[in-house]
Amino acid sequence: MKKVAFFDTKQYDREWFDKLDKSFEIKYFEEKLNPENADLAAGCDGAVAFVNDTINSRTIKILTENGVNVLAMRCAGYNNINFRAAHENNLKVLRVPVYSPYAVAEHTMALLLALNRKIHKAYNRTRDFNFSLNGLTGFDLHGKTMGVIGTGKIGQIFIKICQGFGMKVIAYDPYPIENPDFEYTELDTIYRESNAISLHCPLTRQNHHLLDSDAFMKMRSGVFIINTSRGGLIDSEALLDALKSHKVAGAGLDVYEEETELFFEDRSDTIVGDDILARLVSLPNVILTSHQAFLTEEALKNIAEITIANLEDYFAGRPLKNEVCYDCSDGGATTNCN
Ligand code: NAD
């Protein structure tokens, strides 16, 4: 029977992978996949990894030298993979292109609502029987302008949610959809006109730090920034400055550019050395969730089903419909992630 090394295992992942039928055996490891532990996969035929694993050329070399020729990502994004090294070492990379765009879009709106209506502050106050409303004033979303950057699967669902709230939506995407029921515009217009901006595009070499100090400068004062895409899309230091100067009125962040060593783990008994992150979370108008936008029952089930099907297709020599290949991955793959 084929064996698969499953890295970065959490109880909530394992539940569905254990429950579903599969034709291969899984060896679970809690460690994130990186060059220091890639040899745990020795004796396995494939590996499974996740968004914050370090899949650089060294990791890939160790995997393939140990006989692992397929890597099934149990996520949609693949910006943490060195595709040139994967190509050169004949490592097939598979992914789960869609598992629940609703999960992410709904979490995006949850962040915006919590930020705007100060739910996080109210929750803490009422637990202490403090029923004061001072400082909890929000604004109606109805009639306000939402700027959406990236109108793929998640972006389009988020746009519908915003329209349900009576918001005007303007959007930017280098590959616009046909017959949209919202308005496409340039990034500068989004910056100038939006009351809130939400990111729904992949992280690529071209859009790293898309929201930098220049972009924040162009935005209207009091804008809300929501990022459920990838941390590297925002220059965190520039965001912190924009929050401190009140240019940005609040930020809802499900991702952070230096999240790899922190997110998905309990770090409550350690001193976190990242001063920018520490300052961001200390602000009353920043809500940080640790890359949990995907985390619904439906998404976990779909991730397990599709990852199992991807690996079974590979082991059976069937066509790989969810392969990310080096030649076609120019939009999303980074090849310099050593
Ligand atoms: P998708 O591929 O369906 O859509 C992405 C869209 O972004 C496409 O329409 C593409 O044309 C557009 N795009 C590409 N480069 C762009 C740029 N520079 N500026 C603006 N638009 C650009 O992807 P999706 O399923 O909608 O997912 C979007 C992103 O959400 C993923 O790339 C991933 O980073 C993130 N994500 C986060 C979580 C989470 O738990 N937080 C879960 C899943 C996905």
Image (cartoon, helix red, strand yellow):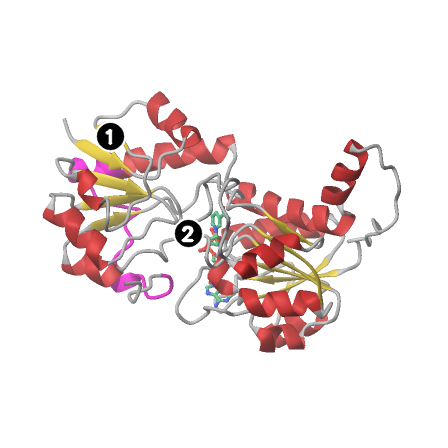
Where residue 328 sits in the image (x, y, percent)? 29, 62
Q: Amino acid at mark 1?
A: Lys
The residue beneath circle 1 is 27
Dominant secondary structure of the magenta stretch?
A: loop
Where residue 148 sits in the image (x, y, percent)? 61, 61
Above-or-below relation of 313 to 108:
above
Q: Which mark is residue 260?
A: 2
| Quadrant occupied by the C terminus | bottom left
Where residue 19 sits in the image (x, y, percent)? 36, 21
Q: Is residue 112 toward the left or the right of residue 234 in the image?
A: right
Q: What's the magenta region? A: 311-332
- The earlier-in-sequence mark between 1 and 2 is 1
Residue in the picture at 50% in, 46% down: 291
| Quadrant occupied by the N terminus | top left
Above-or-below relation of 190 to 91:
below
* Helix, strand or loop for disc 1: strand
Where residue 27 sits in the image (x, y, percent)? 24, 30
* Helix, strand or loop for disc 2: loop
In this orientation, which residue lies closer to the viewer: 319 or 262?
262
